[in-house]
Image (tube, grey):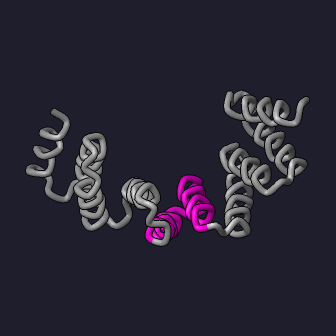
Amino acid sequence: LAEHRYQQVLQITPGSARAYLGLAEVRLSQGRVEEAEEFLRAAIQVDYTFLDAYLALGQLSLHKAQYQQALEIYRQALHLSPWNTDAALGIANCYHALGDLNETEAVLLRASQENRISSEPMLILADLYQELGQPEQAEAALLEALRRQGGRLEAHLALIRFYQQRGQ
């Protein structure tokens, strides 16, 4: 039904980037990844400023292990919205997948400085520090995540897991 409605929107408004994004989401839910990618590219073609399409296409490319392509798409998204945390986190995920942990850290630190409200960059940074065997920095990142969004359950759970792993 949703697919039919999006097709109707495109008949009425052929340049609807939102409808293309909706069709891409429907195709993804059906496991039709290549078609979803085509719809995302169509959304960007009709509206090159449509950030949601870039973020979805970046995520899709990351999922397909096309890390360099995902990196370029996320950079385009960040160009459109320089303070966008999702785009920055996508870039960090790409660098992590490519094995560049130094650049992963740099991007996460930059994202955490540019968005001093969100705890998400700090939570991911804590995971990276644990992976690198730097528990003091991991703990500091988790405590900063709590300071930023103390009511966020994920931050509390991450800190509890961290302490459990350390036997505390």
Residue 102 image position (x, y, % from top left): 73, 68
Residue at x-position 41% and y-position 59%: 64
Residue at x-position 38% and y-position 64%: 49
**Residue 51 visible at all:** no
Q: Report whether 131 appears left or right of 41.
A: right
In the picture shown, does residue 69 fall above or below 90? Answer: below
**Residue 158 visible at all:** yes
In the picture shown, does residue 90 fall above or below 106? Answer: above
Is residue 5 highlighted in magenta?
no
Residue at x-position 44% and y-position 70%: 69
Q: Report whether 151 appears left or right of 168.
A: left
Q: Which region shows up in magenta? A: 69-98
- Residue 50 falls in image quadrant: bottom left
Residue 55 image position (x, y, % from top left): 44, 56
Q: Report whether 153 appears left or right of 25.
A: right
In the picture shown, does residue 38 fall above or below 8? Answer: below
Q: Report whether 22 appears left or right of 53.
A: left
- Residue 61 falls in image quadrant: bottom left
- Residue 104 falls in image quadrant: bottom right
Q: Give the position of the C terminus as an image quadrant.
A: top right
Magenta region, main secondary structure = helix
Q: Nearer the viewer, residue 148 or 39?
A: 39
Q: Give the position of the N terminus as an image quadrant.
A: top left
Residue 88 image position (x, y, % from top left): 59, 60
Q: Nearer the viewer, residue 84 or 152?
A: 152
